[in-house]
Amino acid sequence: MTIHTFKPDLPPPTISIGALGWLRANLFSSWINTLLTLVGLYLLWLIVPPVLEWAIFKADWTGETRADCSREGACWVFIQTRFGQFMYGFYPTELRWRVDAAAWLAIIGAAPLFLRQMPHKLRYGLGYLLVYPLLAYWLLHGGFLGLQTVPTSQWGGLMLTVVIAAVGIAGALPLGILLALGRRSDMPAIRVLCVTFIEFWRGVPLITVLFMSSVMLPLFLPEGMSLDKLLRAMLMVVFFEAAYIAEVVRGGLQAIPKGQYEAAAAMGLGYWRSTLLVILPQALKLVIPGIVNTFIALFKDTSLVIIIGLFDFLNSIKRATADPAWLGMSTEGYVFAALVYWMFCFGMSRYSMRLERKLDTGHKH
Amino acid sequence: MRTIDNPRPAGGSLLTDPRARAWLFQILAVITVVAFGWYLFHNTQTNLAHRGITSGFGFLENAAGFGISQHLIDYSESDTYGRVFWVGLLNTLLVSVIGIFLATVMGFILGVGRLSSNWLIRQLATLYIEIFRNIPPLLLIFFVYFAVISPLPGPRNSLSLWDAVFVNNRGVQMPAPSAADGFWSFWLALLVALVAVVLLNRWARARRHATGQMFPVFWTSLGLFLAIPWLMTFIAGVPFTWEVPELQRFNIRGGWVVIPELVSIVVALSVYTAAFIGETVRSGIQSVSYGQTEAAASLGLRPGQVLRLVIVPQALRVIVPPLTSQYLNLAKNSSLAAAIGYPDMVSLFAGTVLNQTGQAIETMAITMSVYLAISISISLLMNWYNKRIALIER
Amino acid sequence: MIRVKSTLAALGAASLLGISGLAQAGATLDAVQKKGFVQCGISDGLPGFSYADAKGQYLGIDVDVCRAVAAAVFGDASKVKYSPLTAKERFTALQSGEVDMLSRNTTWTSSRDAAMGLNFTGVTYYDGQGFLVNKELGVKSAKELDGATVCIQAGTTTELNLSDYFRANNLKYTPITYDTSDESAKSLESGRCDVLTSDQSQLYAQRIKLAKPDDYVVLPEVISKEPLGPAVRQGDEEWFDIVRWTLFAMLNAEELGITSANVEEKAKSTKNPDVARLLGVEGEYGKDLKLPKDWAVQIVKQVGNYGEIFDRNVGAGSELKIERGLNALWNNGGVQYAPPVR
């Protein structure tokens, strides 16, 4: 007779829930993962404590001059004392309220567009797009209706960066859409023109174009006519980014099934009406992430106007770090600049992700 | 299929006929563009004539008369502006090539890191990408140049490795091999190694296709490249002597010097572009369905092999087009070098030469055509590669 | 609505589009008088020559020359608008009519005069290229600079002189070229380069911008002639004469002892025929230049004579403390010499 003997118990399964289980699954699942985790932790230990110490714990926050900084950590006093210049450049101090007013108007005016229950959103939006630029021009530049002129040569700082970016976006989007439509047009001449334009602007670096605007454009214009330096730079930014937008929009147009075109034509809509009412709304919705990415790139590209000597945000910081009274503040200055640029760009990218989710009508699947 | 020809409605004028309208529209557009172009050309002509500005490309033959801090080909002040062009072009290409290489390596590591099963690595990769793609590249360049490299010690207090490699705020100085007798043997050895590696690759692939067995191609190739030239030195003697940098009154002289401007621009651009390439790689890998991984695993491939043999080849098809535009961006961003005084195409040609000769139109035209040519070449190269790896449907 | 908008936009654009002078004779003056101000191209930051103070107000010798021209034309020195230009932009900006005159420490050379469509109207400052080094290096002469790393500003005559000098003396050097003088100064300070080379006046100006000016010395060698002066477009002799004689008026005023303090009194009570002619008491010399009769009075009253301008901006009365040297009047051992008003 055989006696049944029990095999010894198997060990209990490894914990796969709770903190320990999570740790095991995500950080220590194999020897190679354990190694990576350790390397990662070591990296963090190497970077985070010194950075925090420099930027926060040992930093100097209050004071007036360089002497108020112990130099053991960051000297944020530098940013504080120069803050006005970083924001407004050489814009006359007593007129800075005009910049603030323009900024608040932009925010307050645009706010209703983000309300879900807002009626007549489209009409309001278009009206805003028509009225606001005039208002902003009046406030920032002045020269009529009782406001003193502030020439663009005095504009600077973050304000200039935002102005260039805003004008760039407002100009590049419509132009880019037109170019994209032109590139997909049935008319060969239009197609060739658009393709040439797009490929030229995509093929050259922005700074050569900016150079061109500052040293060459005046030679192209008739004698005696000259364009404002800022205006020239903005034109170049618009053309440059429009070419990129055009390529993004073209992707969206290509993704629209042919049936949509045919259906629109069958309803008796002409080219413009079918494009505006049927094709573009769908195509643009598809490419929102791409468009916003281009906007982000545009915002970053505005920093290149430094090359032609405009006092944008980055340039005002760079200039300030060359001030003999504040030597050795490069790190503080550039970290601050990075933080500001980062907030703008990151904010835009998050907003685009939200928008994308909200507008997702299941086209892509 | 039957086609029905709609007769033009009676009484319709030319303007209501879509085809005629299209023609009219195109002709108008072309005329406008041509007229506009002619207008600009005319303005330029009158401007140049009225103001007595010299034009033409004759200046390329003139002696430049200024020094350049980094030149890959021989250059002296008495060389021509034409020579300056080549110096600038090579410097631009140098930045682009090194930058593209580094950015690709870092980008692939980041992309794979974003999808790692390790939570910490995933977070670190995400953090890196979110930080660096939201900062202007010019800012990164300034940061590296002014905040990282500038504060390094001067040449007299350099950090040194074995008294041969020196790091200071004037760059990195390292020993340089200079050709001695029998330098040809070194080239020969390299050639032999190259041929051996190519043959080895072919053989390994054939064997893998026939038997499914893997051969460690990469490590053997690397070994061959090191071993054959090394063996050659036993046969033909050391083909070169080392020129070791030495501290002189002002500078460390001799050997190879990597100037800080080059370091800054390469580091900044690769750090920046790697963030974008990382995202591209991630989405490429994610586009390969998980079934592929499971199928590969069930065939008994190890995780590394799954990635290398199954995932990456398929992901590349998705990755290459956006990767191309990242490469293009990097090549174009290399022009930012001008901002910190690295003697690239823009800084030399659109900067110094333009100023010395005053011929804005010619110098700008040359500079822009160079970038257009670089862009087109990268596009063509990557299109060719894309076609090669494209899915061949049978 | 849309039409209103586009009209307004056109208006706005028109105010950004400055219409400035043409190259035909007389056209620049007409255009300047029509728009009511002189558009003057200046440097983007060089203490003593042209720089913006904390309030954004421009000061310096170059700026004063612009103001003097405005004083001559309008009788009001404040009717100037400034365009800060980089070294790269300056010539195109003038050629294309973006600025009416260039007063931006620019060296007068034959190729600039002949091939670039410019005319230099005179010399506001006789300069020469020098070297600024850290005392620590113990360098006493430029001849000891073999093997040095040199910082220069891109696209300047100094870049060419430097290479000539080092080649002629059989010395080796590494050039580091920057776009702005700020960057070169910063690099000298951080030790990226051993030497900064530029016009001597600029070296003094940059030295006071350094954190420890006393650690740096300007070497004795002057390796080139750098006559700095204002330039106008070629082909408009009338405007050329105005800018040229504005400078001469300031020099003559100094020579005749006319200062901003005593000019009005002298204009009333002078017995000296030279003074009388310059100040418009005698003759129609202003009219010949198409300027008001009291053009020189306005220049001296509002801006000063040459000596006053020099002292205030770069000389004893300034932080730079540069000696008059070559820039003293001819009868004081210098070479500043103006033709007489007659």
Image (tube, helix red, strand yellow):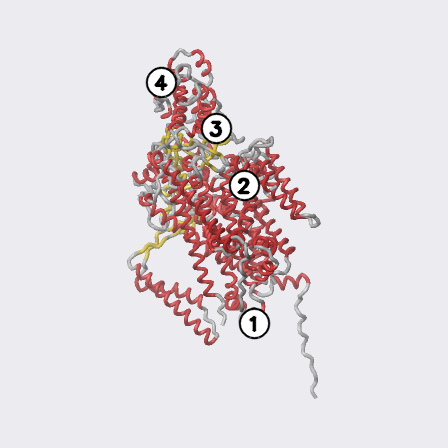
From the viewer's side, name the closer residue of A237 and C125. A237
Residue under the image location 44 percent in, 66 percent down: B219
Question: SS of the residue at dot 3?
Answer: helix
Question: Are tags 4 and 1 found on a single chain?
Answer: no
Q: Which residue is mark 3?
A: C34
Circle 3 packing at 10 Å, graded few (<14), some (14-19), many (20+), is few
Pick whichever, B198 or C59, lies toward us: C59
Query: What's the CA distance linking mark 2 and mark 4?
Result: 53 Å
Residue at the location (58% across, 65% down)? A30
Q: Amino acid at mark 1?
A: Ala
Q: Residue C190, percent across and down?
A: 46, 40
User: Dot 2: within a 10 Å radius of its alpha carbon, few (fewer than 14), some, or many (20 or more) residues?
Assistant: many
How many residues crowd around disc 1 within 10 Å: few (fewer than 14), some, or many (20 or more)?
few
The mark lying in front, picked from 2 and 4, is 4
C-alpha span from label 1 to label 3: 82 Å
Dots 3 and 2: beta carbons under 8 Å?
no
Chain of the residue under the numbered disc 1 shown in the image: B
Which residue, given by chain and number where applicable, does mark 4 sit on?
Answer: C342
Three-letter amino acid code at disc 3?
Lys
Residue type at the position of mark 4:
Arg
